[in-house]
Image (cartoon, helix red, strand yellow):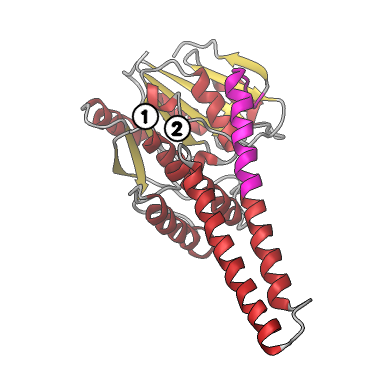
Amino acid sequence: MKLSVVVTVYNEEDNVIPLCQKEYEALEGIDYELILVDDGSTDDTVKNIKSFANNRTKLLIFNKNHGQSTAMSAGIDMAQGEYIVTMDGDLQNDPADIPTMLAKLEEGEFDVVAGVRANRQDGFVLRKFPSKIANWMIRNLTDVRLSDYGCSLRIYKKDIAKNLGLYGELHRFIPVLAKLQGAKMTEVNVNHHARIHGESKYGINRTFKVMADLMLMIFFQKYFRKPMHLFGGLGILTFAIGMMINIYLLVVKFGYGEDIWGRPLLLLGAILLLGGIQFITVGIIAELMMRTYYESQDKKVYRLKEVFVGQAEA
């Protein structure tokens, strides 16, 4: 099979039938499979997909909502195609862009072709502006130079997609994960449509998740194989600051005879430095322990309730 298209959906009952129609039309003439991953929808999303799916369509149904990264990972695990496409199921991504992106990837020079929403149809304040800031930060902190990290429409060679290691909410950083594997990436402009049915599942709170995941990505990029360069550096810096504070306070006490116990400089500095280091360290260690637990035992972070395959002829 040449192509697997992985689409994650959650409460998209009005979008899934038009989505399937567009996929079938856009991919006609290509040896493909369409893998829809329902991330615990509570509306008629599953029912509508089952009523329309053809025999090229697989529907993976989660027992509950696990999040987009987990849903995307399940679809990629199931994919059999030589090339794997990921996209959202809200009809804002356009399946008509897939053949062009596939042709670009088949040229052989690149491992990943990422979409760029050149004419993005989203609100400026809650979507475009935060996205611009996030894109700028990710580009400059990870040195992975893409224009649009928020566009889910991407196509990968199979070996890259199968080894992304998607956990937590890391779907936002797929280009960084691909780069860690040495993938060569390029971008093409793609269509982007305004959402007609349903509502966005994103809120302003995702900003904090992005910031936390960005710290993790920087660690994986720069210190995964040499963590002592990070923790040793922090330790030396912390020790040096502590020494300067102690020397200063000793001079104050013995040189000027002042009482130093309980001073805000001593207490606040120690609490903030130790607390900050502990939080960051515990977060990274927990992430590494989770990856070791799942990957060493070939465990999955999701449980499928059902796998449905359409019967109608394509």
Figure quadrant of residue 46 = top right
Relative image position of residue 172 (x, y in whole percent): 49, 44
Q: Report the residue at 62% width, 18% height from top.
A: 297
Q: Is residue 188 left or right of residue 226?
A: left
Q: Is residue 162 above or below residue 14?
A: above
Q: Report the residue at 55% width, 51% height from top.
A: 210
* SS under mark 2: strand
Relative image position of residue 197 (x, y in whole percent): 57, 45
Relative image position of residue 88 (x, y in whole percent): 50, 38
Q: Which residues are magenta?
A: 281-302
Q: Is residue 312 left or right of residue 135?
A: right
Q: Is residue 227 above or below residue 109?
A: below
On residue 65, the disc is none
Mark 1 and mark 2 in contact? Answer it, CB < 8 Å. yes
Query: What is the chief secondary structure element of the magenta stretch?
Result: helix
Q: Is residue 288 above or below residue 237?
A: above
Relative image position of residue 140 (x, y in whole percent): 38, 56
Residue 92 seen: no
Label total for image: 2
Q: Is residue 300 magenta?
A: yes
Figure quadrant of residue 282 = top right
- The residue wearing badge 1 is 156
Of the pair 129 and 192, the residue shown nearer to us: 129
Q: Residues within 10 Å of mark 1 (few under 14, many from 20)?
A: many
- The residue wearing badge 2 is 86
